[in-house]
Every structure is written in C-alpha cells, then in structure tokens.
Amino acid sequence: MKLLSFIADGRASFGAVKDNGVVDLGARMAGDGCTTLRQLLETGRLADTAKLIASAKPDHPLDKIIFAPVIPDPGKIICVGLNYRDHVAETGRTVTEKPALFARFACSQVGHLQPLVKPKVSDDFDFEGELALVIGKEGRHVSASRALDHIAGYACYNEGSIRDWQRHTSQFLSGKTFAESGSFGPWLVTADEIPDPSKLTLQTRLNGTVMQKTTTDLLITPIPELIAYISAICPLAPGDVIVTGTPGGVGAKRTPPLWMRPGDIVEVEISDIGILRNKVIAEPA
C-alpha cells in the first residue's frame, strides 16, 4: 500500500493511493478514532485497512489534494548524520563507532509539491536526499534481528540544511530544523512491499541534474542496527520517524558551493517508493 496524509476540501485527512486517486481513510475510519495516519499505526490495523482499500473507490483525484508530510504529527523525528562513507569523506570527518544522531521538529517539514522555504537569515540552503522509515510497532531495546518487524513503511526525505547555522556550534540542530526547510513524502510504502530496505537506489536532483546517487546497502549503520541503537535510548512508538542519512554530493562540499535558491526544483527519488518533489521559495519578508 501507499499511504499518505493530505488536505482536501479544507480538511486534513489520510488515505491510500488507488487508481490515480486517494481513498479517504480518515473519513471512513473516523468513527473508530482514526483520523490521522499516526493514529492508524497506533491501532495496528494495517491489515484491515488493506481490505477496506480493496473494496473502495477513490474519493479524491491525486492531482487535487494538497500533500502533507507523511506523518504530520510524529512524536519523534530522529535523524542520522554521517551514515555514508562518501559523505563522511567529503566533510573531512572520520567514521564514528556509533551513529551520530540529532532531531528535527515537525514544523520543519512539508509535504510533496509544497514549497521549501529558504530562510531570510541565510543563503546556505543545502539539500540532503535520504530514506526515511516510519515505526509501526512500539518497542524498547529492540534486537537488530527483529528490528524490521517494527517498521510500518518507507518514504523519501529531503533533510534541508542551513549550513552556516549548522556550523554555529558542534551541535547540528540549529541548522537542521528551520521552519518548512525539509520535506517528507510523497507517501509511505508499506514494509510488505519493501522486504529488504538495503536494496534501494536513491537519487537527489536539483533542477534535473543528479547531485547525489547511492544504494542503501552502503549505509554505515544499517537500518536494523539503527533501530536497535535508538530503541536502547528511548522507546519507539508508532508514527516515529527515523531519517537514515545522506550520501555524498551535498551542495556545501562542491566547488564552488551549490545552494538551493528560490525557483529551484529539488527531487529525491528512491526506487520502489517514488519521487518527492519540491520548489524552493524565499521566506516572506
């Protein structure tokens, strides 16, 4: 299944992609207390949802909805830094024994086809194409061997970064969570359709030119180990998001640096998932 969050007719909801349209699951399941995708994951009813979708007709054309971030209201967004060797090399850092983690906030992300906002305080707006996973089953101290059982599905993520603010201190957060600077979408592809997330290809394109390209088997800390490590720190809950890291090719490390500018189109494409596309705009005065 492809599950997404969206706005249609002025109402926020969630649903499933079917026949170039959207089955409005939020409208159908509101009586069961499911009005958001996160709430659906909390109920553990994905299998029942598949049956509902199979017998339903789309309620909205796909080109008439407003895409929201896949999970608009995550309890946690945990990002992994320096998780591809080519990116570690281009930054001049060394590979760390344990994953480098930092957080983003929900207000920092937008959905597919929604504008990424270049902040007025900086011109150093960089792209980072990444694979994101969404937790579907709660867990603490999850073993790597069982980690994939806790994943609801996968999506594309552009972990937009404000590089000069990122360098203000040794901590990344100040450059990583500007309002509407990253994007998450276009939808979640359920884990049953991607049994091995290490066999995906990722590309980031800026105005049609490939900037980043990798395969997910090159992650330094693979997804099962990431889940095991993070779940030792805090419980993982349905709807939590883990953004797994970006490969080499970021704009900051090009000569000269290549920043996203208003009017640019940036795309993150991941095989078996789709294309996350956003236009860059300037923050309003």
Image (cartoon, rainbow, N blue to C red):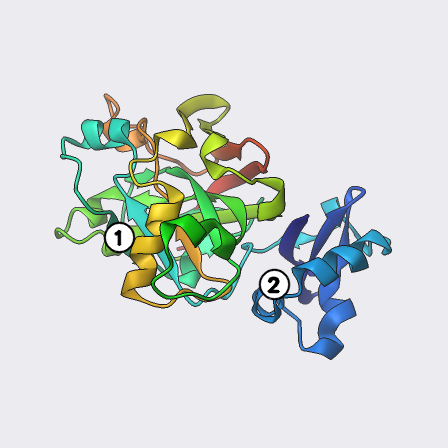
Q: Where is residue 68 shown, x and y percent of the image?
A: 58, 56
Query: Vertical placement of 170 versus 123: above or below?
Result: below
Q: Residues within 10 Å of mark 1 (few under 14, many from 20)?
A: some
Q: Where is residue 60 shown, x and y percent of the image?
A: 79, 54
Image-based side of 13 in relation to 280, left or right:
right
Q: Where is residue 117 shown, x and y percent of the image?
A: 43, 49
Say the numbered circle drawn on residue 101. Answer: 1
Q: Residue at image x 13%, y 52%?
A: 169
Instruction: Look at the numbered discs 2 and 1 and tell me whether their residues touch, using CB distance below 8 Å.
Output: no
State which tag comes first along the sequence, 2 or 1: 2
Q: Residue at image x 80%, y 60%?
A: 52
Q: Residues within 10 Å of mark 2 (few under 14, many from 20)?
A: many
Query: Vertical placement of 8 versus 62: above or below?
Result: below
Q: Tell me the kind of residue under disc 2.
A: Leu
Image-based side of 190 in relation to 259, left or right:
right
Q: Quadrant of residue 140?
A: bottom left
For label 1, the SS is: strand
Query: Vertical placement of 212 versus 129: above or below?
Result: above
Image-based side of 188 in relation to 219, left or right:
right
Q: Tell me the kind of residue under disc 1.
A: Leu
Q: Residue at image x 17%, y 43%?
A: 97
**In front of the other: 221 or 208:** 221
**In front of the other: 132 or 121:** 132
On the question of residue 155 being in view, the answer is yes
Q: Quadrant of residue 113?
A: top right
For label 2, the SS is: helix
Q: Residue at image x 63%, y 54%?
A: 4
Say the numbered circle drawn on residue 37. Answer: 2
Say the numbered circle drawn on residue 87. Answer: none
On the question of residue 284 being in view, the answer is no
**Image quadrant occupied by the C terminus:** bottom left
**In front of the other: 189 or 284:** 189
